[in-house]
Amino acid sequence: QVPAIMQAVAGAVPSSIDLGSAANLSVTVSNAANVVAAIGADKLDYSLTTSGSLTGSFLNQMDMALGGGNVHLVGFDTSSIGMQSGTISLTSPSQGVENGTISIPVNFLVVLPGDYNSDGIVDAQDYVVWQRNVGLTGGATYARGDGNRDGDVTVAEHDIWRSHFGETASGFASAGGLGGAIPEPSSIALAMLGICLWGQRPIRLKAWTRQS
């Protein structure tokens, strides 16, 4: 029989993923044996496992020659913010198989929604990041205020910041990632006041007295 050839292709890894959100990475595993007909070609037996900050295992899988491949969804562990890493491992016990062992490293960034400077809290400093970059179109990153990852920085990113204002990474996790409460108007007012005063020269107050 013509030996099987294991081939694995992973999809695109998101530039960033929200803390506590559900996200998956597609992995297509196929028997790439160069044959005209499946008769006389060996099937591909394999198992897929994950480690690190990836989840999911698919044991005792099979793809026939010219079978078209199988798509598996590997999960991202988004329980903590920061750069995360993991490995997708594939092994095949098929006799004479080529590429019988494949290892795919995966790195991804987990962020707190609205925390554009990634310091673990959604506060006035994140508003400053958004304010400096609002209006950018195409190619904007999360670090420049693109909260919904559409490549643009618009009022939508401000709404994300506002809806999560005051949240911290630890508080978000303990609340089960149910989303933050909208800040009280007084909190917003204080934050805006602090922003407006940043970078300004000291204001000199002059006292006036009225002569009788």
Image (cartoon, helix red, strand yellow):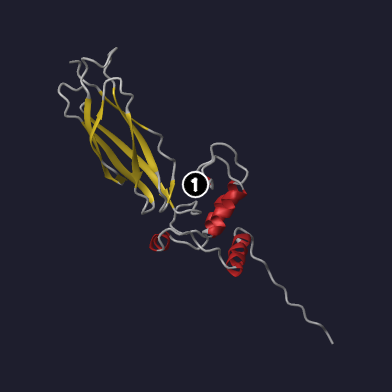
On the image, numbered disc 1 is attached to which residue?
A: 143
Query: Residue extending furthest bottom?
Result: 212
Quarter that holds the N terminus = top left
Q: What residue do we see at 60% from left, 39% from top? A: 137
Classify mark 1: helix, strand or loop: helix
Q: Estimate the x, y position of residue 122 in percent, counting from the top left.
A: 49, 58
Q: Residue at x 58, y 54 (%)?
A: 159
158 or 10: nearer the eye?
Answer: 10
**Quarter holding residue 73:** top left
Between residue 28 and residue 16, name the one nearer to us: 28
Query: x, y (%) of residue 15?
Result: 44, 41
Q: Nearer the viewer, residue 149 or 82?
A: 149
Up/down of 114 relative to 92, above or below: below
Relative horizontal placement of residue 154, taking residue 165 as reference (left or right): right
Count of marks overlaid on the render: 1
The relative height of residue 147 versus residue 203 in the rendered view (above or below) is above
